Image: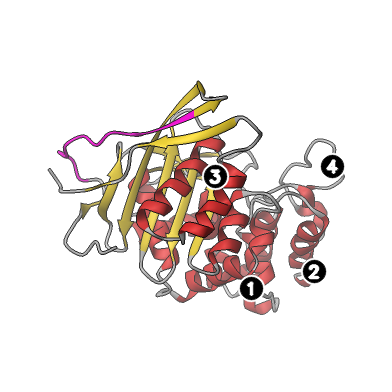
Amino acid sequence: MSFSSFGSGVGSSGRASAPTLEVRLTRNGITESVHRVHAVVCDQRGRVLMRAGDPQQLSFMRSALKPFQAQVFVSSGAADQGNHDERALAIACASHAGEPGQAREAFKILWKSDIESEQLQCPTPAGRQSPLEHNCSGKHAAFLATCKRMQWPMESYMQLDHPLQQQVLKRVGELLGMPGAELVTARDDCGVPTLQLQLAQMALLFAHLGASEQPELERLSRAMLAHPDLVAGEGRFDTAVMRSGHGQVLSKGGAEGIQCLSRIGEGLGLAIKVEDGASRAKHAVGLHLMRQLEWLTPSTLEELGQQFLEPIPGVKLEVNGELRFDNGR
């Protein structure tokens, strides 16, 4: 599908309204719940190419931001200094399930950098034994390794005014074409800053991530695609999409109904926001729109649909609506 003749800039105003997508959960064919969803496709130039709902919808990016937080791990030289492999890069971008193999990869980042796991400041999940089992432990381990490489304070690495977090803001700002100091931040559940962005800005970031043109982002996207089992976990959407897509689509979700995807090598990013934050709705819309965009084969989408659109017998998720080309009006 070609988009070359369409689009307008991120954040532009004055467009005609585009209907939101609607996800219905039905039980034995009877509607039980309804979710409203916004979605947008952008290219690397920041042009809004297709949309449903409001491309300027504001939301915190949550864990979908992790590949861009991990960028500093690569750009600082910390990843190379510690001889960290692609598995380390993948776990740095992950929202993992706390499985032993995933926690072990986060530990290896610390071990290779001669850092004690007690220095992790992400919480220990309920019922678990270590912060290494927290879904953000890879990100935090990479943060600490970067601080050690750059000789930055390690005890305050989660603070917004820390050099590490300021570098994250700077790098994200550069990708968005704006000063990092203008980005709106808030504390994420794991303790580090997250960003409030327009949905179109999230799509722009993922357009960059999948374009394979910037060496640091290309290393991170390649690692995620090579090790989808580390990025999320068995039975989870991001792992299932990347494993089934055979390197065609990169997927990273965030809490409160955020889902971002990119088509590898094409410089296109897709961002999704469910108004009520439901994960089941963002997964249904992700599959629905990948079918419309022809990012995955019908047979692959059929297999994924069996897992995510029909979670239990008699219950189905149905998506109404589609992306529309953006004409800038």
- Residue in front for this viewpoint, 274 or 86: 274
Residue 134 visible in the shown view: yes
Of callouts 1 and 4, the N-terminal one: 1
The residue positioned 31% from the left and 55% from the top of the image is: 42
Magenta stretch holds residue 13? yes
Q: Nearer the viewer, mark 1 or mark 4?
A: 4
Q: Type of residue at label 3?
A: Gly
Of callouts 3 and 4, the N-terminal one: 4
Q: Considering only vertical position in the picture, is 68 above or below 74?
A: above
Q: Nearer the viewer, mark 1 or mark 2?
A: 1
Residue 150 relative to residue 212: left or right: right
Magenta: main secondary structure equals loop
Magenta region, residue range: 12-24
**How much space separates mark 4 and mark 2, taking CA atoms?**
24 Å
Give the residue pinned by disc 2: 114
Give the residue pinned by disc 1: 79
Give the residue pinned by disc 3: 254
Q: What element carries label 1?
A: helix
Q: Type of residue at label 2?
A: Asp
Give the residue pinned by disc 4: 128
Q: Type of residue at label 1?
A: Ala
Q: How crowded is mark 4: few (under 14 residues within 10 Å), some or many (20 or more)?
A: few
The image quarter containing residue 1 is bottom left
**How much space separates mark 2 and mark 3, taking CA atoms?**
30 Å
The residue positioned 42% from the left and 58% from the top of the image is: 206
Q: Type of residue at label 4?
A: Arg
Of callouts 2 and 3, the N-terminal one: 2
The residue positioned 25% from the left and 54% from the top of the image is: 49
**How much space separates mark 3 and mark 1, taking CA atoms?**
24 Å
